[in-house]
Amino acid sequence: MSRTILALVLAGSLLGLAAPQAALAAGDAPPPPRQKWTFSGPFGKFDRAQLQRGLKVYREVCAVCHGLKYIAFRNLADLGYSEAQVKAIAAEYKIKDGPNDQGEMFERDGRPADYFPTPWANENAARAQYNGVPPDMSVLAKARGYERGFPWFIFDMFTQFQEHGVDYIHALLVGYKEKPPTGFTLPQGASYNEYFPGHAIAMPPPLSDKRVDYTDGSPATTDQYAKDVAAFMMWTAEPHMEARKRIGFQVMIFLLIFAGLLYFTKKKVWADAH
């Protein structure tokens, strides 16, 4: 009986390992390559310099189409910006407000309490301009991802692997190809992307080398841009991740100590019962 169970477990493992290859053979997108992130693992932390570079990429490239509606300007203080810098960044945006005393809507400079405005007036305007509504980037790193399959998802529970979204976003941004493979029919107006499901994506390649000027000496390459903006999107999706990990670790330590106290209390209480 034990040999039968072992055989089933091994068979399931082989099927899980073979799943990505089977999906690739069927024409689906391959799983994104694993990347190294400072925030991975139970003790991971955000790299503030990387997050600031990612914000720069977002503002200079992504913000043309994509909003960030769940992030307020005041949240940028968590990235290491001073109060004056936050106010200066907010003031660069125009916020629709009102009505005023005359009952009219008006525009004003942004304030730290305001949220990033969407780059289009409404969804109908976005559809007309972009042939669809560009997704908001606030929680995209949590909303997008891929299935790792068996047995990897079991290991993920212990390693706290949660970088499905950022790995996918990085792969998507660097996965554009100038020409589709032979035999692939690309719809008009679409671009070929190796990691996008179906491979035909409406968004043209957003990044290219030297498109964004970095002032900290980081490489001005498509790969670096993709990593930085993906890390920034992980922060926008879970800005309190570091606090969650810290509190979770403290809770685990408390539970271990509490379990030990219960064990020795039980031994003390029942010591005279034998």
Image (tube, rainbow, N blue to C red):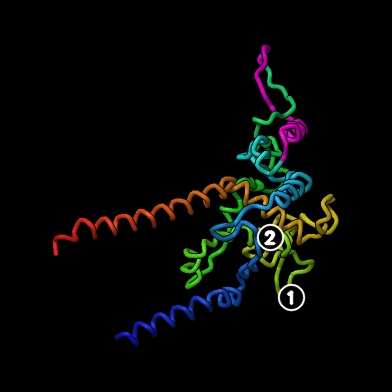
User: Could you tell me which secondary element the residue under label 1 belongs to?
Assistant: loop
Q: Residues within 10 Å of mark 2 (few under 14, many from 20)?
A: many
Give coordinates of residue 128: x percent, y percent.
Answer: 70, 43
Circle 1 packing at 10 Å, graded few (<14), some (14-19), many (20+), is few
Q: CA distance from mark 2 to mark 1?
A: 25 Å
Please determine whether, in this image, residue 95 is positioned above or below residue 272: above
Residue 37 lies in quadrant: bottom right
- Tell me which numbered mark, 2 or 1, is placed earlier along the sequence: 2
Q: Residue at x 52, y 49 (%)?
A: 244
How far across and how far down the image is residue 50, in percent? Answer: 72, 52
Vertical side of 46 occupied by 271: above or below: below
The residue where tag 2 is placed is: 170
Whether residue 101 is situated above or below residue 110 in the rendered picture: above
Point out which mark residue 126 bears.
Answer: none
- Residue type pointed to by label 2: His
Q: Check the picture and name the quadrant holding the N terminus.
A: bottom left
Q: Residue at x 38, y 55 (%)?
A: 257
Along the viewing direction, whichever of 88 and 247 lies nearer the viewer: 247
In the picture, the disc for residue 182 is: 1
Please give the range of residues in magenta: 81-103
The outermost residue toward the bottom is 3
Which of 186 and 1 lies nearest the eye of the viewer? 1
Percent coordinates x, y for residue 68 in the rendering: 65, 42
Residue at the location (56% across, 60% down)? 41
In the image, 273: left or right of 253? left
Please tell me whether residue 84 is drawn above or below residue 131 in the rendered image.
above
Residue 260, horizontal then vertical, whole percent:
34, 58
Residue 253 sits inside the magenta stretch: no
